[in-house]
Amino acid sequence: MNKWSIRLVGLISMILGGFLFVYSVKYITAEWPQIFVGLLSIFFSAMGFGLLIMPLDFIEKSVSDNDSRLK
């Protein structure tokens, strides 16, 4: 995966986490499903944020190292 696709997956994951949070607060009335969906929204938001701020320099370096090994 290239840099932009990883960043796009992170952004989509953060947006999905936000929608899950709003859904769990607004539309779910039972206690345990609301807790589980709320925790899932936190997970998606945290993973998306992690993907957005993850340094991607090692990907370029490993690709160039693999290319030099193949030659």
Image (tube, rainbow, N blue to C red):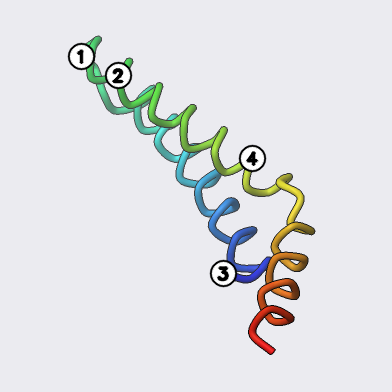
Q: Is residue 60 above or below residue 14?
A: below
The disc, 4 or 1, on the residue closer to the chain's N-terminal end is 1
Which of the two residues, 23 or 36, is positioned nearer the viewer here?
A: 36
Crowd class of label 4 (few under 14; some 14 to 19; many from 20; radius 10 Å): some
The disc, 2 or 4, on the residue closer to the chain's N-terminal end is 2
3 and 2 marks in contact (CB < 8 Å): no
Mark 3 residue element: loop
Q: Residue at x 47, y 37 (%)?
A: 44
Nearer mark to the viewer, of 4 and 1? 4
The disc, 4 or 3, on the residue closer to the chain's N-terminal end is 3
The disc, 3 or 2, on the residue closer to the chain's N-terminal end is 3
Give the residue type that dot 3 points to: Met
Q: Which mark is residue 34?
A: 2
Nearer mark to the viewer, of 4 and 3? 3
Q: Residue 12 placed where, x, y %?
A: 52, 54
Q: CA distance from mark 2 to mark 1?
A: 6 Å
Give the residue type that dot 2 points to: Gln
Instruction: Name the residue carrying label 3.
Output: 1
Q: CA distance from mark 4 to mark 1?
A: 30 Å
2 and 1 marks in contact (CB < 8 Å): yes
Instruction: Name the residue carrying label 4.
Output: 50
Nearer mark to the viewer, of 2 and 4? 4
Q: Is residue 66 left or right of residue 25?
A: right
Q: Quadrant of the C terminus?
A: bottom right
The image quarter in which residue 16 lies: top left
Which of the two residues, 52 or 29, is positioned nearer the viewer here?
A: 52
Give the residue type that dot 1 points to: Ala
Instruction: Name the residue carrying label 1.
Output: 30
